[in-house]
Amino acid sequence: MTLMTATARKLLAAIALLGAAAALTSTVASAGVLPEDRADVLYHRYEGGGVTIHGPSVLVRKKLAEKYSVSANYYMDMVTSASIDVQVSGASEYKEERDQWSVGFDYLRGKTTYTLGYTDSEEDDYHATTASFGLSQDLFGDLTTVSMGFSRGNDTVRRTISNPLNPGARIIDPTFEMDLDRWSYRIGVSQILTKTLIMTLGLETITDEGYLNNPYRAFRYVDPEDATNFRLATEKYPRTRTSNAVALNARYFLPYRAAVFGGYRFFTDSWGIRANTAEVGYVHPFKNTPWTLEASYRFYQQDHADFYSDLFPRIDFQNFMGRDKELSTMDSQTMHIGATYEFGNAGLSFIKRGTFNVFYDRIQFNYDDFRDARDPGLIAGQEPLYEFGANVYQVFVSIWF
Amino acid sequence: MNGSLNGTWQIESSRTRAIIGMRARAAAIVLAAMTLAGCGDLQPWVKPYERQALADPIMSFDANPVSTAYMDHVFEAREGARGALGSAGGGCGCN
């Protein structure tokens, strides 16, 4: 985890909660129909804000006896980080690795699909496990699908320290080990509205209890005696967090075989964060060719958490104090483009078809109350606001068999 | 005198609100009953043989699950919001 992963916790929480639902998502997707047999091999690369993260993701799904389906996903992050948090803290660039395994099992009975999932995420100083259960049911002539799910996560938070015997190396601090528990409840409805329009509505409540700090991150407070007017101290977070999110998505089939889609999500939590996410996109298969192009635009905006500040007046200003930029007032804009090339079985009898895909996303993050404190020549509170752009690349092959 | 008038007006006002509230509840119950009754006779207005457009892969909310999961992860790690990302899915009953 280390300071690097600006939100290692959230990241892991995301993985934990979404891991099963991510790799195994479509298992919950349509009751009455098990997901297709397929294999996906993906290489991902993220570059932005002094951080490079890359690695593979492999997913395999297979039906058994037309009633059962099993799936497995392996995902890896290889991180090299000299993020703004790392630089402000005075630490040097670090490298780390995270491995995640997910397995899933589906059972189809009539028009009901039952899903079980388990995810394990491991890095040197953070271990997360999540178990999930879900079911979905087709109703009203299969025009409506109702789904619901529950996940339970357990994380163990550790931290690294300098090795007393070898100051250049880091070891796990044997005196520090914290727990974090997580519960997630979700319901969703998918509704066919017309022959060419489908809509989904999803709600999810997530509750955390335990150590929600990042043990490496610090907040800033004013110290008039310091040359730059500030000092750093370890963040203090509440031990609980409950969030609610509701999302509405729609997809429309155009007469000339193309699709437009859009979605909106509203989010609020007990830390005072309110966020809005909106997305629109377009998918265009070219007639009589194996090519499909797609493009989308996503906008995200949030207000800061109650206990967030870029610069606190003093070290004991209030009970909880944080300076995680992911808790600040911020927005992001994402432009996505993608190209897909579809191929046949390539002479291999066990393959039905396959696709080769190249996706690129450009993300711009803008912070309204998080300042760039890297220049020691500037007075705290007067530095420019931070912003950065990120490039995200994905190359993957999918095969249906 | 004014106090008495005010008192009478407040009583009338609260009675009016109560009556409106009762009527609203009754209307909601009738509406719910009519809706539920309608469900019994609900016929699929999009027949299974009319769903070829919905069954097209470009209409899938999650055509590329490894890619979707990865991008969800990218955003969740860098933004404060979380959850409600997995769409309820296709649900079109078409294989």
Image: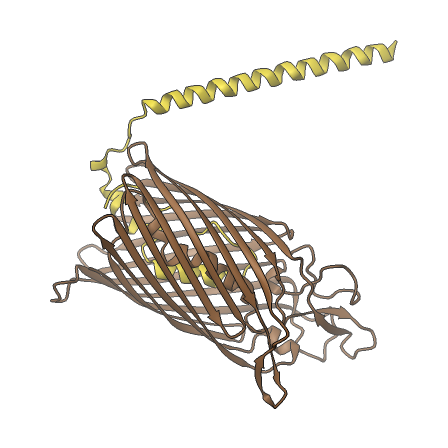
Chain colours: A brown, B yellow
Q: Say if A186 sits above or below A236 in the image.
A: above
Picture quadrant where residue A397 is located: bottom left
Q: Residue at x 24, y 39 (%)?
A: B51
In this rendered view, identify the residue nearer to me: A386 or A109: A109
| Residue A204 shown left or right of residue A282 in the figure | right
Residue farthest to the front, as pictured = A174
Q: Say if A274 sits above or below A52 in the image.
A: above
Q: Say if A232 sits above or below B83 in the image.
A: below
| Residue A316 shown left or right of residue B66 in the figure | right
Q: Residue at x 42, y 73 (%)?
A: A54
| Residue B76 x, y percent position in the rendering | 50, 60
Of the 4 image quadrants, the one containing the C terminus of chain A is bottom left
Work out whether residue B87 can be spotted. Answer: no
Of the 4 image quadrants, the one containing the N terminus of chain A is bottom right
| Residue A256 shown left or right of residue A117 in the figure | left
Q: Residue at x 29, y 51 (%)?
A: B58
| Residue A227 shown left or right of residue B78 in the figure | right
| Residue A270 x, y percent position in the rendering | 63, 50
In this rendered view, identify the residue nearer to me: B67 or A276: B67
Picture quadrant where residue A112 is located: top left
In this rendered view, identify the residue nearer to me: A204 or B78: A204
Picture quadrant where residue B33 is located: top left
| Residue A94 x, y percent position in the rendering | 54, 80
Work out whether residue B63 can be spotted. Answer: yes
| Residue A286 x, y percent position in the rendering | 23, 56
